[in-house]
Amino acid sequence: MCAAAAAGLRPNGGLLLRFAQARRGSHPPPARGRRGWVTAAAAACALPWGVWAAVRVTGVETGFPAVALIAFTPYVAATSLVPVVLALLSRRGRVALAASAAAVALVACVLPRGLPGPAAPASPGGPRLTLLSANVYYGLADPEALVRLVHEHGVDVLSLQELTPQSDDALTRAGLRGPLPYDVTEAAPGPVGGAVYSAHPVEKVGGTARNDYFAMPRARVEVPGAPSVEVVSAHAIPPSGPAAIPAWQDSLRQLPDARPDGALRVLAGDFNATLDHAEFRALLETGYIDAADATGAGWAPTWSAEGSLPGVTIDHVLVDRRAQVRRTSVHSLPDTDHRAVLTELVLPRSR
């Protein structure tokens, strides 16, 4: 009887089993769907950092706003662990791995500029040259504060951008000609002008270097005991909109290359570019050293000193590799949106 009962229950048991299997087949477990959404969300979170890293590493930033935005790479690198942590918390290993690769790439791009690099060999007893560069913002920067910086730091050469005739006169009244009696100036109304002032005799090099908008005076400075030093007050056109990008590129390309067997050259000024711009790195690759990068001061922002945007480093002193950079620092100036860059160099001895 038990066997008969058991036999009689088998069809019902098989029916229940088939019913359960049918239900499982037509309704997948809801957890699988949730996992897909979590993976997609983690990947979407990591995507901006991945794209940014790819653009920065390959140097393919083109057009506006990409050229302007790439200047903020240090801030993107500082937040690059956010998608890594989110992916790990959601247990998305592949997404975490991809996000980690992007973070490593971004950090590798920006970390070295905050660490002192190997110093170039200096000539024993080579003469020192202290150079200060500042964008004086339509000539509005406080002249007395600027002259005070010159005195406090023993500046030998001063490179200015956006110098107006009025600001040139104001600097003279503030006493600039005492420590820096020699000059090559191209003062002009608005932001167009520039100048190189020097404690040593200077000679104007060729015609005034000029891009499509800004004057960029060149001065050959005769430093006792050293070869002549050609100082260029550099001022590139800002990449402020789609139409400005080609002019920005051209203005950087028009700056003179470093030539190992040519003039000992220093470019000092407002490049409107950071180390994260491929165009700027191409200029460095001709044989220049970025003074701030070489001394671990490359994270110090120089613009905007008064604005609401995060600061970026667009003012630089580029130095011929035959000179040694001893120190670099950034200094605030009243009434200008840029900070001044101070660099001390050791020059090779003249032969």
Image: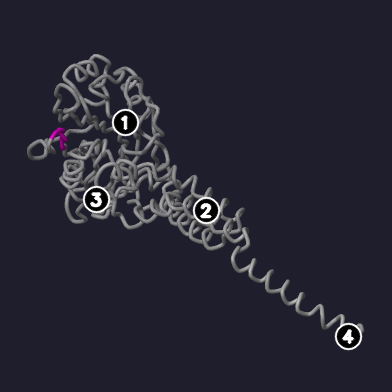
Residue 336: where, in percent of width, then height?
Answer: 32, 23
Residue 327: where, in percent of width, then height?
Answer: 40, 41
Q: Which mark is residue 174?
A: none
The structure's colour scheme is one colour
**Residue that badge 2 annotates:** 42
Q: Are marks 1 and 3 in contact (CB under 8 Å)?
A: no
Q: Which residues are magenta?
A: 213-218
Which label's residue is closer to the chain start, 3 or 2?
2
Q: Quadrant of residue 221?
A: top left
**Residue that badge 4 annotates:** 3
**Residue that badge 1 annotates:** 155
Frontmost of labels 1 and 2 is 2
Secondary structure under the numbered disc 4 in the rendered image: helix
Residue 229: where, in percent of width, then height?
Answer: 21, 43
Q: Can I make out residue 322 in this image?
A: no
Frontmost of labels 4 and 1 is 4
Residue 70: where, in percent of width, then height?
Answer: 34, 45
**Residue that badge 3 annotates:** 283
| Residue drawn at point x = 20 percent, y = 31 percent | 196
Disc 4 crowd rating (10 Å Cα; few below 14, some 14-19, many 20+) is few
